[in-house]
Image (spheres, grey):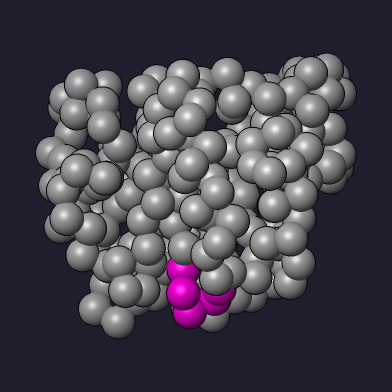
Amino acid sequence: MALPKTRFIETTLRSPLLQLPVRSVVFELDAARVLYSPASVLTPEQLRDAGAITDLVAPSLMHTAGMKAAAAAHPSARLWGPVGVREKHPDLSWHGILGVDPWPFEAELALIPLPGMPKMNESLFLHHASKALFVTDMAFNVLEPKGLAAWMFYGSFGIYRRFAVSRLFLRFAKDRPAFEATLAKVAGLDFQHVVPSHGEPVLDDGKARLIAAFRERGLIK
């Protein structure tokens, strides 16, 4: 599967109990190449094969573990992360904080911080060239789960073999009015596909299925 001006790098976090697919993405922008959510299990070869990278983005406090290796592989790249990332990784030199400092790629890769989640601070990204919305842990679409405890892990969060908003993710939403107001705005954006960090991309009818997933959890009307 290919989307315009994007490249997917597929990896898997492996344990005897669960194998979690993790997707990193390279965005080809007019004047930049952005590596989004570099996975902690990316190999040095995969990091080299990503090509020249100008910016590294950790879209959530739960997706920061791969930033150190990515920064070492791309020492001239600027590092971006959510509020709280400087405290979590004080050893790294952060160029900007998502949702606080000016994001220079808004016209091509729109930034959508999700408020009211101080322990996660996830940001969504809308890539205009591909008409795709990129999410990290808000929604999963792992259709072929693997691992001895996969059914229990995914089932307990309402995401077993299906595209859905994770119930675990919603536990991090402490300011529900602010969080749900932003999701209502997301539902009004112009996109066609939804690409989660975990599981298969939802192509063509991604927006309709995401809105249905929001409604299933009572997040929007």
Q: Which residues are magenta?
A: 127-131
- 42 vs 170, left or right, is left
Judge whether residue 137 is colored magenta.
no
| Residue depicted at x 76% and y 67% | 205
Judge whether residue 130 is colored magenta.
yes
Label total for image: 0
What residue occupies the far front of the structure in this picture?
221
Q: Nearer the viewer, residue 31 or 115?
A: 115
Say which quarter of the image contains residue 195. Answer: bottom right
Q: Nearer the viewer, residue 11 or 128?
A: 128
- 31 vs 67, left or right, is left
| Residue depicted at x 53% and y 37% | 180
Relative to 213, does residue 91 appear above or below in the rendering? above
Where residue 44 appears, as percent x and y from the top left, is 40, 49
| Residue depicted at x 27% and y 67% | 105
- 66 vs 131, left or right, is left
Say which quarter of the image contains residue 29. Answer: bottom left
Where residue 102 appears, as percent x and y from the top left, is 17, 55
